[in-house]
Structures are given as C-alpha cells and as structure tokens.
Amino acid sequence: MDERSDQELIELTRGGETAAFDLLVRRYQERLVHSLEHLLSSREDALDIAQQAFLLAWRKLSSYRGESSFYSWLYRIAVNAAASHFRRPTVSAGSLDQLHDVGGIELSDRRVPSGPGQSLEQDEEIQRVRQALQQVTEEFRQPLILREIEGFSYEQIAEILGIPSGTVRSRIFRARQELMERLDRDRRADAD
C-alpha cells in the first residue's frame, strides 16, 4: 500500500499525475461501497453511486480545500449523488446487526442463541427494528445511520451533511425517539 498521505496524492493529482487519484480510489473504494450499502440496501446501487462519486470527486478535486478529511468530502459527494437518484435510502439486512444501541434497545446481543427459538426471536426483533428504521423520516434516519452504523462523529456527520453539529445531535435524538415510538406501536399491535 502506498504510504503517501491523501493530501500528497491530491496534490500529485492536481499536478497531472492521474495514477495518484487511482491510489485514492483503491484506498477508499471498498469502504465507500460498504458505507453506501447501508444507506441503499443494494450492493449494485452502492457500486453505481460510488463510481459516480469518484467521478464527481475527480472533476471537483480543484474545489477540495482540505478542511475535512478526503473521505468525509468524498462521502458527502456520494450521499448527495445517492439523494439525487433515490428518494428514500434504506438500510440493508446486515447493517442493523451493527447498530449497537438505539434508544436503549440492544441489537447486537452477541450471545449464542440457546436454541432455534431464541435465534428466531432475535431475527424477528432485528426485522422489526429494520422495518421501523426504514419508516423514520429520512431527515432523521440518515444522521442516525451515519452515527450508529457507520461510526462517524457528530462533527464528521455535520461535514458530510452540511449542517451544524447541534442540528446533527438534534436529528439523531429525534430519530431515536421516532424509532422507539414506532417499535412501541408495533409491539402493542403484536400483543393485541
């Protein structure tokens, strides 16, 4: 792997060395595709959007000022590209397994199920959470996914979405509230 920093590769690319940008693509392609899969629920869509994001990044590289990490800047381009193609990004089946704690619900209980019944119950709970999360307002769902699944800091999410850090915190709080309300409603409906 090339040891040069992102900034060095960016400067080389700006200077006309296209191979330097290829190194950036190789460095971040899989991470970007994986991140986009969580938003789009489709590897094919994620691959398409990632390709589009890298192309846009190549074209806009002169506008990159280095105020955020290259990956944060690239991810923001990708999210904007996805938003222009898809109205409601969804969460993939596997991504909720990574969601650690949403409003007090522990989803990543790593205990080995004691039997097929317990495994089935865990699968059903994950499915309930997945469905409820997909119903959360997109404005709130996106920051929650970036925080809880992707592991971005509040500041990084603010950079990616182009909103103040306080707004990020507020939207994540609202997303958790909305998710909990939906799950409570679903549980009450199941009990009836």
Image (cartoon, rainbow, N blue to C red):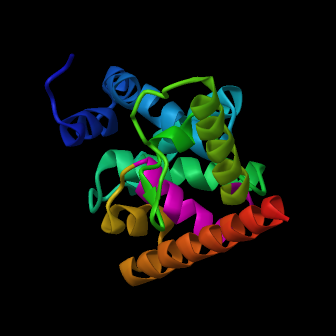
- In the displayed structure, would residue 44 be above or below residue 133? above
Q: What residue do we see at 62% from left, 44% from top? A: 126
Span colored in magenta: 134-150
Q: Dividing the picture into quarters, in which one does residue 25 lie?
A: top left
- In the displayed structure, would residue 28 be above or below residue 81? above
Q: Quadrant of the N terminus?
A: top left
Q: Nearer the viewer, residue 126 or 41?
A: 126
Q: Dividing the picture into quarters, in which one does residue 190 lie?
A: bottom right
- In the displayed structure, would residue 163 be above or below residue 120? below
Q: What residue do we see at 41% from left, 63% from top? A: 157
Helix, strand or loop for the magenta stretch, by majority: helix
Q: Quadrant of the C terminus?
A: bottom right
Q: What residue do we see at 47% from left, 36% from top? A: 32
- Judged left or right of residue 153, residue 96 is right
Q: Residue furthest left?
A: 3
Inspect the magenta stretch and tell me whether residue 148 lies in it.
Answer: yes
